[in-house]
Amino acid sequence: MSLVQSLKDTLVERKKKGRLRQLTLPEYSVDFCSNDYLSLSTSPLFRDSFLERINAIPPDLPIASGGSRLLSGNSEAAESVERFLAGFHDAQAALLFNSGYDANVGVLSCIPQPGDIILYDELIHASLHEGMRLSRAEIKIALDHSCPESLKQRLIEHKETSRNIFVVVESVYSMDGDIAPLDQLVKTVEESGLQNVYFIVDEAHATGVLGPKGAGLVQMMDLQSRMFIRVHTFGKALASHGAVVLCCNTTRHYLINYAKTLIYTTAIGIPFLCSIGTAYRLLETGQTDKMQSHLQSLIQHMHAKLLPLSNTKLQVDHHPTSPIFSLRTPMPKHLAETCLWHGYGVRAIMSPTVPVGKERVRVCLHAGNTFEEVDGLVGIIEKWLLNSKL
């Protein structure tokens, strides 16, 4: 059998299981599926501010970075953005990566050492799993989801170790949309008396949405000093591209020397640095406050509308301040297709992205949505429940 034939057979098998992924173009009028939580990607304010920055670029400044940051790709613009991000997020230092995936893989693949222990929430993102897979730490233990008691038990089991213990969590989980009890997790570590526990927190889905000026859950809970590493991404609420690792100066220098996803890749170019800077200036100056407030109003409205629909056919999972709603049903594809047919863009999330038996329709709210659009989507879901053969 040829290689190409074996690849084709594998795809056929995946299709039979209903798991085949395909690229599609958007064919809906109302967005309820993207991660553009503040709707900055379609905001005239963001566009005008971004273009103003772009047009201010000196004509002799290269648009592209031209190489990795350790060769020709570093710039004053990149370092200026990093200094700003460190200040905004109340961190000692900041280091840019090309994506949240690269940041997570880079951090976890090089920082934990042989003999170290990684305790990770069972629902963390695939990028964190990939980083752990590449890590030299031999002991990697899943914690029950957002469960301080599970963390407590694992810390008791390893209280005699002299090695580092890393606790890896997300602040807002991308598929379920629930918010991590970070304050309780930190309290659990403090009560253990252990001084060798280090938190790594992925803030991708909290950036721009939660906390003071959209600074994230860690700053909302004032836990900056308790975090070893925070990762914020720019491709969701901030309508940009890339990510930043917030850490201490020594950790930043270590990552520059050992994080392969930083060392062996072309650095972010000037246009994206302008985009990142534009988004954060809007956050800092309060120009996104109304967007964040409207988003929270929409979240509360949809929460009140959807929760009563939960029954044996549909399980609605939602944290009261999260923009992500999880609608679990035995027929997620049919529900998503029905909504799409009526012009509402939602997506069915299938195994292996989520565990078998926990397939769902993922609904994301945005500042650009309206109360009427929310009511329209909920109405379609309600009709689907009445007409579906479950």
Image (cartoon, grey):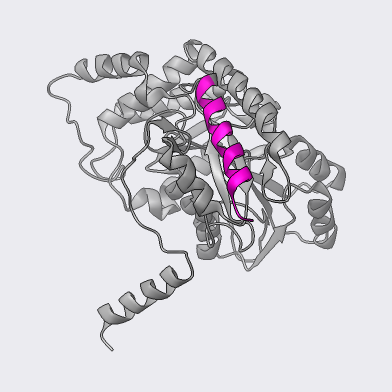
Q: Residue 272 appears at what percent x and percent y?
A: 31, 31
Asked if residue 250 shows in the view, the reply is yes
Residue 204 vertical placement versus 12 (above, below) = above
In the picture, the quarter occupied by the C terminus is: bottom right
On screen, 328 above or below 46?
below
Indicate the quadrant where residue 10 lies: bottom left
Q: Position of residue 130 (x, y in %)?
A: 50, 60
Q: Is residue 65 above or below residue 328?
A: above
Task: Residue at 28% x, 89% y: name it.
Answer: 1
Q: Is residue 373 magenta?
A: yes
Q: Which residues are magenta?
A: 372-390
Relative placement, left or right, of 185 versus 228 is right
Q: Nearer the viewer, residue 4 or 22?
A: 22
Residue 35 falls inside the magenta stretch: no
Reply above or below: 138 against 55.
below
Residue found farthest to the bottom: 1
**Residue drawn where x is 33% and y is 26% of the image:** 275
Out of 345 and 249, give the one closest to the viewer: 345
Give the image location of residue 156, x and y in percent: 85, 57
